[in-house]
Amino acid sequence: MAPSFTISNRQRKHDLSDLDLQTMTSRLGEEVCRNLKESPCSWISPDILAAIERQGVFNLVFVSDRKIRQLNKQWRGKDRATDVLSFPLDLEPDLEIACLEAEEDCFEVGEIIVSVDTAIAQAQDYGHSLEREVAFLVTHGILHVLGFDHETPEDEAEMFGRQKKILSSGGYIRR
């Protein structure tokens, strides 16, 4: 079982039809949940994780560098394009209660916004496919939505270690 994703392409410059985004996001969502079951973190209880798996929805939006720069300036005070932005909901105990008592079929976990322009440039810089780069950015965004960060060396090691395992087990190996 895996959380679901709504996917919106809000940029027109690049064709994303070659990427099987539904399969990719389903696989990555499943691998993130598997990783969190095998190596739990302190702030996501097993009940919250189960609710995210069963009813959680991530909104994934693809935009241009121009748009992500606007959003980065608006929400982070940084007037430059970036590769991915994440907007999480609060994973406090109140969310656990809301998840467990939800009468609706699903609830929004958070939003992940990816710049296609930057993803293409980074794929070229790193010498791998756009599919692998998008998988990396989506995984990075999911982990941020779920409360992971890389502000300290310890947090960075944990987050990047999880990313590497998730991408590898999902079949998105860096070549």
Image (cartoon, helix red, strand yellow):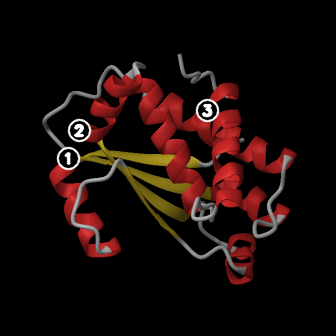
Residue 66: x %, y % from top left: 15, 53
Of pointers 1 and 2, the one earlier in the residue sequence: 1
Q: Which mark is residue 27?
A: 3
Horizontal side of 102 relative to 26 (left or right) equals: right
Q: x and y percent of residue 88 in the render?
A: 52, 67
Q: Nearer the viewer, residue 79 or 173?
A: 79
Q: Which mark is residue 64?
A: 1
Amino acid type of the residue that numbered disc 2 sits on in the rendered structure: Asp
Q: Is residue 57 left or right of residue 70?
A: right
Q: Measured along the vertical axis of the image, is residue 63 above or below residue 149?
A: above
Q: CA distance from mark 1 to mark 3?
A: 25 Å
Element under disc 1: loop
Instruction: Tell me whether circle 1 and circle 3 mark residues in contact (CB < 8 Å).
Output: no
| Amino acid type, callout 1 | Ser
Q: Position of residue 73 (x, y in %)?
A: 25, 70
Amino acid under disc 3: Arg
Q: Residues within 10 Å of mark 2 (few under 14, many from 20)?
A: many
Q: Residue furthest front?
A: 153
Q: Quadrant of residue 21?
A: top left
Indicate the quadrant containing the N terminus: top left, top right, bottom left or bottom right: top right
| Image coords of residue 74 (percent x, y) | 25, 74
Q: Which residue is mark 2?
A: 117
Please give the label number shown on residue 102. Answer: none
Query: In the image, what residue occupies the spot 55% across and 59% down?
Result: 144
Asked which secondary structure carries label 2, the reply is: helix
Q: Earlier in the sequence, mark 1 or mark 3?
A: 3
Q: Nearer the viewer, residue 125 or 83?
A: 125
Local crowd at mark 3 within 10 Å, few (<14), some, or many (≥20)? many
Q: Are marks 1 and 2 in contact (CB under 8 Å)?
A: yes
